[in-house]
Image (cartoon, helix red, strand yellow):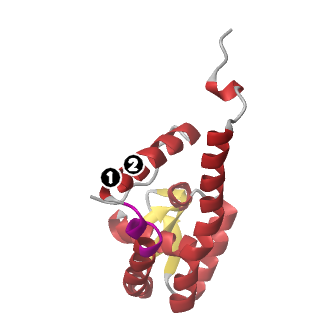
């Protein structure tokens, strides 16, 4: 039986690539949080919830769909929604199409916070990622990321609205 790529040990080049990616995966999240926490008291995860709701039809999503977009277990999502609800940024309500489901609904104050935080977030992402890459590298980053994601899950990842 021929050896598959998954059966061979990592070589030096693989280890260097993996080390770089693993470091990025550890170092980037707190740097995405930092300006959002400092300027708006919300994490990147919470920002993503507000963004997903703002992008959704009717500014509302079923919790299971929102959890899928956020790559989050329902308990983690629920804790984040608790914090957002206490601030009046999000409301949970029964889904009118399916009474067994709950929807998260973006509130006007949440939309206002999102509008205020988006330029801060975009400047941070630009400084951390895009200012360091050429246009060709940005395209490569997109393609590489999509390939890796497709190896993790068969379902479609969240995509920005067109």
Q: Nearer the viewer, residue 31 or 73?
A: 31
- Residue beneath the point at 52% across and 45% down: 149
| Rendered position, 124 above or below 103 | below
Dot 1 crowding, Cα within 10 Å, few <14, some 14–19, many 20+? few
Please name whichever residue, 151 or 86, is drawn nearer the observer in this view of the structure. 151
Label 2 crowding class (10 Å Cα cut-off): few <14, some 14-19, many 20+?
few
Q: Position of residue 43 (x, y in %)?
A: 58, 78
Point 60% across, 86% down: residue: 86
Q: Write down the region rendered in magenta.
A: 127-133
Quadrant for the C terminus in the image: bottom left
Q: Residue furthest top?
A: 1
Q: Is residue 107 above or below residue 16?
A: below
Provide the major secondary structure of the magenta segment: helix
Q: CA distance from mark 1 to mark 2?
A: 6 Å
Name which quarter of the figure residue 44 lies in. bottom right
The image's mark for residue 136 is 1
Residue 129 counted in the magenta span:
yes
Which mark identifies residue 140?
Answer: 2
Is there CB contact under 8 Å for labels 1 and 2? Answer: yes
Q: Nearer the viewer, residue 111 or 40?
A: 40
Q: Is residue 136 left or right of residue 76?
A: left
Q: Position of residue 87 (x, y in %)?
A: 55, 88
Q: Where residue 84 sits: x, y (%)?
A: 56, 81
Q: Residue furthest front?
A: 12
Q: Is residue 80 above or below residue 11?
A: below
User: Callout 1: helix, strand or loop?
Assistant: helix
- Magenta-drawn stretch contains 148: no
């Amino acid at each position: 039986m021929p050896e598959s790529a998954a059966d061979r040990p990592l070589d030096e080049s693989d280890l260097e690539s993996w080390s770089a990616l693993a470091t990025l995966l550890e170092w980037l999240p707190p740097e995405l949080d930092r300006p959002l926490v400092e300027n708006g008291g919300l994490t990147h995860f919470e920002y993503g919830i507000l963004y997903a709701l703002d992008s959704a039809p009717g500014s509302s999503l079923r919790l299971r769909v929102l959890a899928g977009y956020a790559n989050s277990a329902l308990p983690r999502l629920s804790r984040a929604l608790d914090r957002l609800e206490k601030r009046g940024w999000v409301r949970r309500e029964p889904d009118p199409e399916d009474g067994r489901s709950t929807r998260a609904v973006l509130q006007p104050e949440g939309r206002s916070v999102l509008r205020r935080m988006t330029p801060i977030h975009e400047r941070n992402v630009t400084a951390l990622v895009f200012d360091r890459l050429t246009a060709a590298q940005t395209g490569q980053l997109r393609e590489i990321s999509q390939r890796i994601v497709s190896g993790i899950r068969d379902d479609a990842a969240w995509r920005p609205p067109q």
